[in-house]
Amino acid sequence: MEHESDDKKGYDIKVNTQATEKNRLENDLNARKKLKNLKELEKAVDLMQKPEIDSDQFFKLIDSSIQGLKEYRLIVSAIDLGVLEALKTPLSAGALAEKLGCDSVLMPHFCEALYSLGLLDRFEEGALEEKGNTHRHGKEKNDEKDEHTPENGYENRPEGRVQNNGSTDLSAVYLVSELSATYLLESSPFSQRHYLAERLRTVDLWNRLPEIMKTGPIIFEKGTFFGEVIQSMAENARCGMLQETVKVVAENINLENVKKLLDLGGGHGLYAIAFARLNKNLQAFVYDLPPVTEKAKEFIERYEALNVDVILGDFFKDEIGDGYDLIFSSFNPGGKVPSLIPKISKALNTGGIFVTRQMPDEKMKSNPLLNLEWNLWTFEGVKKGGSSYSFENSVPFIEYIDMLGNYGFEVFCELDMKDGSRIVFARKIG
């Protein structure tokens, strides 16, 4: 009986042990399930949680940046492919593609994109003949594009040829618009082709930004640099800056009393040529570096400015002459350098007038991107200032103007121009 009792006890212990182990395993499994459910709950919470910083600002920044890149590449490609020159006469997208050897499927989209920017005009097929070459469809620029899909602006235009499903109506013909004809055709007197080429050099600097950030600014040779960009500067001036400036100067100075004029750092020489046209008895001189004055000579010859000549030199190092009744300076690199003021004063006759035009520093400091761009490159041996169009030995333009009084000048007029620049008139009184 005792053996039977012991066996039963052993059996009960074994059963209890197994039950305990089973319970433990079940509890462990339940705990794991709970943990898994908790993690899944946490994941669900993470999925539904929004960033504390609203995403609109980020996407608008990225999308607007990319949109600008798209439009820039579109314009440059249109010039490189010869699209605008080819469309001096109206062509369909298909005929244009065949003429230029381009893809016939892409060309309608390419033309529509240019049309959306106002660089092409678009006609119904046959409209030129039916309307005596005068009827054009009006177009409305879609200013309010979806910030995440800028291209949607094309779809929203009721006259759009590129449909929502991607299909294209090939019945349209295209012609270069007045905007493109004025500024992008090579034959236009206001063509900005050299300006665009200069912008390409700036784009290259930005493409090399990581490299420049590590190795420092790109160094250019001064004469070569200005010799290359001077055509771009001339093109810019012809688009309104030249005309406005000459008008303002003529309104505040009696040019009939000016017999000898110096365009200091005059580059292309268009200002000197314009002033000389207003007074045939005026002898004007364009002072700049040798590679630059070669371009000035071309403009002097083109406009038959017999009373305009050039003086070669570096005004930071060399003398600039004397006996001048008027010294004019527009966006001169030394236009905020006080050490040049005595040289300018010495070169003027008593009663002579110094006219200088610069961008006020307070406006430049508000553009960090432009300030960065200005400092991505420099000249050999030259250190630039922190803000655009300034050098290490420059002072703020307002301080520069105040310092003129120390060298016998009296400021009698200050005017703000349409582009935000400021033109200052000072007379040498002693």
Image (cartoon, rainbow, N blue to C red):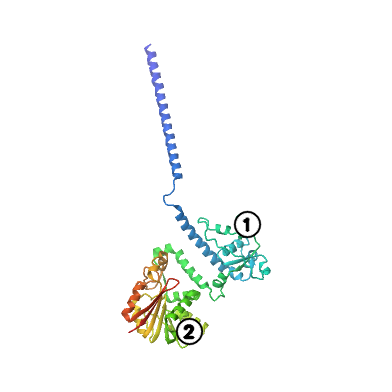
Tell me if I can see residue 394 in this picture.
Answer: no
In percent of width and height, residue 23 lies at 41, 27
Quadrant of the rendered image containing residue 43:
top left
Amino acid tagged 1: Ser
163 or 36, nearer to the observer: 163
> Which residue: 46% across, 68% down?
202
270 or 315, nearer to the observer: 270
**Residue at far bottom of view:** 281
Nearer the camera: disc 2 or disc 1? 2
Q: Earlier in the sequence, mark 2 or mark 1?
A: 1
Disc 2 from disc 1: Cα separation:
58 Å
Quadrant of the rendered image containing residue 245:
bottom left
> Which residue: 32% across, 76% down?
403
**Residue at far top of view:** 1
Q: Decide: marks 2, 1 in contact (CB < 8 A)?
A: no
Secondary element under disc 2, as helix, strand or loop, is: helix
Secondary element under disc 1, as helix, strand or loop, is: loop
Q: Above or below — where is 194 with respect to 117? A: below
In percent of width and height, residue 285 lies at 44, 84
Quadrant occupied by the C terminus: bottom left
Tally of numbered tags: 2
Q: Which residue is mark 2?
A: 278
- The crowding category of the residue bearing disc 1, from other C-alpha atoms within 10 Å (few below 14, some 14 to 19, many at least 20), is few
- The crowding category of the residue bearing disc 2, from other C-alpha atoms within 10 Å (few below 14, some 14 to 19, many at least 20), is few
In percent of width and height, residue 398 lies at 35, 73
Quadrant occupied by the N terminus: top left
Tell me, for residue 289, which label it has, or none. Answer: none
Amino acid tagged 2: Leu
In percent of width and height, residue 386 lies at 37, 68
Quadrant of the rendered image containing residue 81:
bottom right
Q: Which residue is mark 1?
A: 167
